[in-house]
Image (cartoon, rainbow, N blue to C red):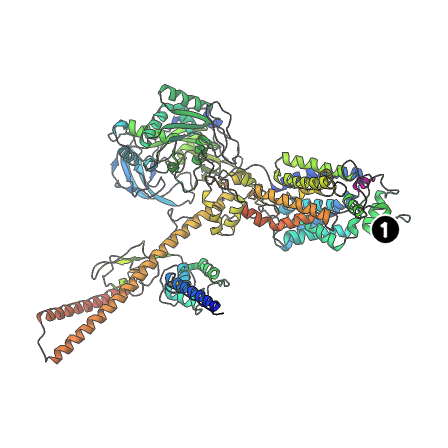
Amino acid sequence: MFFSPLISKSDSVSAIMLKVLLALLPGIVLYVWYFGPAILVSITLASLTALGTEALMLKLRDRPIMPFLKDNSALLTAWLLALSIPPLAPWWMVVVGTAFAIAIAKHLYGGLGNNMFNPAMVGYAVLIISFPAQMTHWIAPHGMVISELTFPQQLDFIFHDVLPNSDTLDALTMATPLDTLKTHLHLDQPMRQILDMPIYGRFAGHGSEMVALGFLLGGLYLLASRIISWHIPAAFLGTLFVLAGIFHLVDPAHYAGPLFHWFAGASMLGAFFILTDPVSSPTTNNGRLIYAAGAGLLTYLIRVFGGFPDGVAFATLLMNICVPLIVLYTQPKVFGKKGSQP
Amino acid sequence: MPVGNDNMRKLYHFHGGIHPPSNKTQSTRATIARAPLPAKLVIPLHQHAGETAKPVARVGERVLKGQLIGMPDGIVSSAVHASTSGTITAIDMQLIAHPSGLPNLCATLIPDGEEEWVPRKAIDYRDHSPAGLQHLLRMAGVVGLGGAAFPSDLKLSLDRHKITTLVLNGAECEPYITCDDMLMRERAAEIVQGAEMLRFMLDAEEVLIGIEDNKPEAIASMRAAVAAGGHRRMEVIAVPTVYPGGGAKQLIRVLTGIEVAAGVRSTDKGVQCFNVATAYTVHRAFAHGEPLLSRIVTITGNVLHPRNYEVLIGTPIAELVALGGALPDTDSYIMGGPMMGFPLPSVQVPLVKATNCIIASSKKIFPPPPPVMPCIRCTRCADVCPADLQPQDLFWFAQSREFGRAQAFNLFDCIECGACSYVCPSHIPLVQYYRFAKSEIHAREHDKQLADKARVRHDYREQRIEREKQEKADKLAAREKAAQAARLAGAQPLTAQQQAEQAELETSRAHIRELAQSAVEHADEGTTK
Amino acid sequence: MLSALLVMSAIAAVLGAVLGFAAIKFHTEGNPLVDKIDDVLPQTQCGQCSYPGCKPYATAIAAGEADINRCPPGGEEGIRKLAELLGVEFKPFGEDAVPKAKSLAVIDESTCIGCTLCIQACPVDAIAGAAKQMHTVIASECTGCELCVAPCPVDCISMQVIGEKIANWKWKYPVYAMTATT
Ligand code: SF4
Ligand code: SF4
Ligand code: SF4
């Protein structure tokens, strides 16, 4: 049966998702440049798990498999999850997290388009709550620690939990810049001194700030190609900037500045790739502003006053809950009912 | 937001809109041609919004060109005429151009080739009252030629509101369609005179003629006609090309800044809008005394010779297709444009007043849509919706049949332009869902009205029965009393009146017996037959 | 102590008066729930629910004496609405109550003997005619209840299904192949 309109723009869900994946590439390349290729292993592992779980769930739910496998949404979830957890996390963690994200957070809610929560962030939350120790296996950037693992050694560790005889895990990995900051502030060290540590770079973590820059670049591409609208990144980064700015101005010795918060942790990834997930974010522009501002506020609060290393994931999940309400209260006025007419 | 243009006027902006490939140049290379007289015309009696016209011609009757064959029936209705002289051979149900693919009442007319006219009477509109002119338009079968075919006379009803602006719609924003474009290029003077007549009837101050800026020839020709005719306060305005900029509401917004909400009449806001082709028809009706018998139609798409033709109402679409020379891989025919048109149930259906364009369709031109995916709430649809709706929510409600919520989310503000479906990356036939929801809601409201009426009638009947019972009981009691009194007073003879009553009762009883008897006989007949 | 008592009783008296006034002022006729249920019923007045009309059925439902799936003219949609209104589970039609397509009664005017039996049977006074004169059904008022069919001594009333016409045609729910399976 024919339905008008008979013409359509040549665009598709899979093309959109593919562009988002492409936009992640600059960040991933920089990741590899600074931290070695281990991240590619977890991305591959997560991708395979995601596709497998997706196919299995589709089969169980009796839905057509190929069109959904080809829509690239499972891949995107996998990549975002892999990028949020330490590259040296054991292989089964990647698998468990991804499978949980796809099977529970996506398909049990009804599959593509129906999930209330960002699946990747659900996967992340499950991992960090269940396996907090392993979630600290962040690789130090090149030249930061005395001994570095070769790629085969990394694989050995990821898959068999084996380290070369001489090494201990502590010598190879390090806490994230956000974590380090928190720990040292607790020890009452002044901010200036902490930020002089080699782990920090120009405005945030050494290496990781460049990866964040890569994500920013990809995000700008998404904005330019109208895959995402400016509302979410602007409100999120804006809120983060203002909050960090105020605290920093009031007490620079204890609170890092806005640029630090922008480029540390998952800020950029969150602003452009996670919070902007269309399915779990509001559909109105005003709603997007409220949602992202709320996420910015929560992220800052969790980072500065909370117990978790980063706040983006939990901020996203908490704001996900509010989406239906936000959307309901931010319905735009329809044509002819606006009241601003000559 | 003012838009840059060569008019000296501030233009306004409406939300959203899309830019589909226009595909208009194919059919504007050649001038408008007159389609030859077909061997048979099928003239539907329902070509306008509202009630079907009442047939007033007899089968076998010879009718003249322009003779009334369908009388307007009801307030929202319009007249239908014989498009040429000939013989009416049938008035029956025939397949028509309607998305339902259902038949409707049509008059079949076999032309005699004489083209013999009924007497025509040209009038000077300035000698008539607006109400009189309105009636003339109704009897001339003039309806909106932009697509909705709403009787034009009703749009000219003067109520308490002063009309400041008459908007003439020459935007023609749908891809492929060029009938208005060509009409403006070739018959601008008559359109402009028609606009003058409409202005007279509405007592409007200014006339704004909006034409999308992808039709420079039409703009030039219309401007020349306005200048040559010395029309004051009439302006031809180039508006930006964006779909659906030719929607009446959108064009009114662009030209005047006024937004007319759903359910509000534009005249309440001091504006009225007519299509350029309608203005042309009004001119023909007054200045030549001709009812609406033909219109300009674009035949385009998968044809050898895309072109505009002036075609008699009732001509089978197949004739037009033959003129265009449909290519062998044509698989269906679309009436209207690719955004809002619908496939015809058969190429034999007749052309009607609302037919602005026929597109021969093939897999090449309109490839079958890609598989439908779930909505990912990307809001591309909301970004382009000219009515500022949230199509993804409306879709959700319509799909789950939550009609109340769909209405609460302004479903009826949707103009079914299809912009949302056009951009949807999941290729969901969104408009189809809205049409479904709208017609379900209408049907339910209709059922509800019927139910309410039935309830009232039922209650009334119950009350009546109750009352009758009471009356009967009262009567009985009264009679009993009287009898008792009579008995008490000793047997008195019946009064004359009582005797008459008794006799009447007897005859009616006899009659009922007779009826029952004949009923039984009839029943016997029925079984033995 | 005394003054406190006085104040209390004064307040009580005022409140009582207000309540009493409200009870009179906002007095609702009949049982509002019955009316609400009756509002949802299709008013065909056919008696297929085994009650002598929609209102009695509504009363029975409100009293908890009748199931919500007894009204065939209301269709599944009707049951759904009742379920929603009463906050109970949807219940499909039983085998004895199956909805039919809506139809109209039509009197074969050449056979009608004008006996008025159908007029008496029609629950909504939709049949016009007088004794010994031909009767006819006012189509716009007929609810299609079929109650007039049985009493007719000459079987001249038939029920004709209201087919789909342009005037009552509805756009259909979009049906499309949900994504090719390969
Ligand atoms: S464009 Fe399509 S997929 Fe996107 S929100 Fe609208 S309906 Fe959903
Ligand atoms: S069809 Fe309706 S909902 Fe879709 S864009 Fe047009 S007006 Fe908006
Ligand atoms: S079955 Fe008939 S009488 Fe009973 S509620 Fe339904 S329509 Fe009314």
Q: Chain of mark 1?
A: A
Residue B137 locus on image (x, y percent): 30, 34
- Classify mark 1: helix, strand or loop: loop
Image check: B98 left or right of A191?
A: left
Query: Residue A277 in magenta?
Result: no
Q: How many marks?
A: 1
Q: Main secondary structure of the magenta part?
A: loop
Pointer 1 residue: A162
Residue placed most toward the observer, C93 or A241: A241
Rendering quarter of residue B463:
bottom left
Residue placed most toward the observer, B284 or B131: B131
Circle 1 packing at 10 Å, graded few (<14), some (14-19), many (20+), is few
Q: Up-down: is C19 above or below B44?
A: below
Q: Can see residue A142?
A: yes
- Type of the residue with mark 1: Val
Residue B390 locus on image (x, y percent): 52, 43
- Pick the quarter of the image with the C terminus of chain A: top left
Q: Which residues are magenta?
A: A189-203
